Structure formats: structure tokens, C-alpha cells
Image (spheres, rainbow, N blue to C red):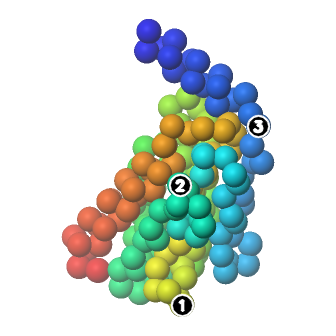
Amino acid sequence: MKILLLACCGLLLASCQGAGPSGRAGSGETLPPCPDSPNCVSSLAGDERQRVEPFSIHGSPSGAMALLRQVIQGMPRARVTFASGRHLQAEFRTILGFIDDVSCVVDEGKGVIQVRSASRIGYWDLGVNRKRVEKIREHYDAAARTSGG
């Protein structure tokens, strides 16, 4: 029964084609906006249904991004595709094989790391992107406490 439910959800998610990967955050000054679909969350979203809080910067911005990279690389089915002292782009493969994109960029003016997580295809994500961002936050904050950052 569980397999049938997963297969149905997979078909539902695959029925709507998304815009593809968002790529890097352009010049790095901001993140791309979320589409109108509920399969994206962002710390820059104006719509409260898509809004998540940005990450705190623990230590220096480049040190915080290095720690964030370590955290994401240690997560299941995650692959960092781009990282610098100010930007991070990662792909997360879902259990059903879909790829979701996570983008992070340092916002020194606000003293935070802006974050966006979005499904590449489909319409609904059943809250997966929000849960992912909060799981990253939990591990990142714990790693910062452990490292004294």
C-alpha cells in the first residue's frame, strides 16, 4: 500500500514540469524568486506561505558558508554543485528520484545567509522543501555550537 501511495505521489509530482534548476544566484546579490507554486520556500519570499527565516551567520561569512557546505555534504542524497565564500548551490535527490535545488547566499547588509529550496518539477512538494531548510538549519546551528562559532 505504501509503495502504491508513493508511486501515485510521484506521478502527481511529475505531471507538471517545472522551470528546471535555478542555477547560481546570478551575480550573487540575491536569490531567484519562488514561482507561484507551493513547491518552493525562500527567506526572501513575500508570500508568508513560502517564507522561511534566513540562516544566522556564525563567525565570519566565509567560515559560516564553509560550515554550511560541510553540513549539506553530510546530508543524505545531497550534492554541493557550487560553493564559494558567498554562495552555495546544492542538489537534493528525493526518495522518488526527483531533484530539488537549494541555494544560499551571504547577505552581509542584513548579517544573514539567505536561503531558497525548490523542486525542479511538479506543483506540490508536501512540505519537503520547508522541512529540508529547517533540517539544514538544525544541523548547521548545532555544528556551529560544537565548533564554537
Indicate which label's residue lies in the foreground, 3 or 2. Answer: 2
The amino acid sitting under disc 1 is Gly
Q: In the rendered image of this protein, does residue 94 appear above or below residue 36?
A: above
Indicate which label's residue lies in the foreground, 2 or 1. Answer: 2
- Please name whichever residue, 84 or 18, is drawn nearer the observer in this view of the structure: 18
Badge 1 or badge 3: first in the primary sequence: 3
Callout 1 environment at 10 Å: few (<14), some (14 to 19), or many (20+)? few
Q: Is residue 132 left or right of residue 44?
A: left
Q: Residue at x 67, y 80 (%)?
A: 29
Callout 3 environment at 10 Å: few (<14), some (14 to 19), or many (20+)? few
Mark 2, secondary structure of its residue: loop
Badge 2 or badge 1: first in the primary sequence: 2
- Please name whichever residue, 31 or 46, is drawn nearer the observer in this view of the structure: 46
Q: Position of residue 120 (x, y in %)?
A: 68, 45
The reply to whether residue 80 is visible in this rendering is no
Q: CA distance from mark 1 to mark 3?
A: 36 Å
Q: Which mark, by number, is residue 49? A: 2
Badge 3 or badge 2: first in the primary sequence: 3
Mark 3, secondary structure of its residue: loop
The amino acid sitting under disc 3 is Gln
Q: Position of residue 58 (x, y in %)?
A: 35, 80
- What residue is disc 3 on? 17
Mark 1, secondary structure of its residue: loop
Q: Residue at x 43, y 71 (%)?
A: 55
Q: Position of residue 147 (x, y in %)?
A: 25, 74
Quarter of the image for residue 82 reads bottom right
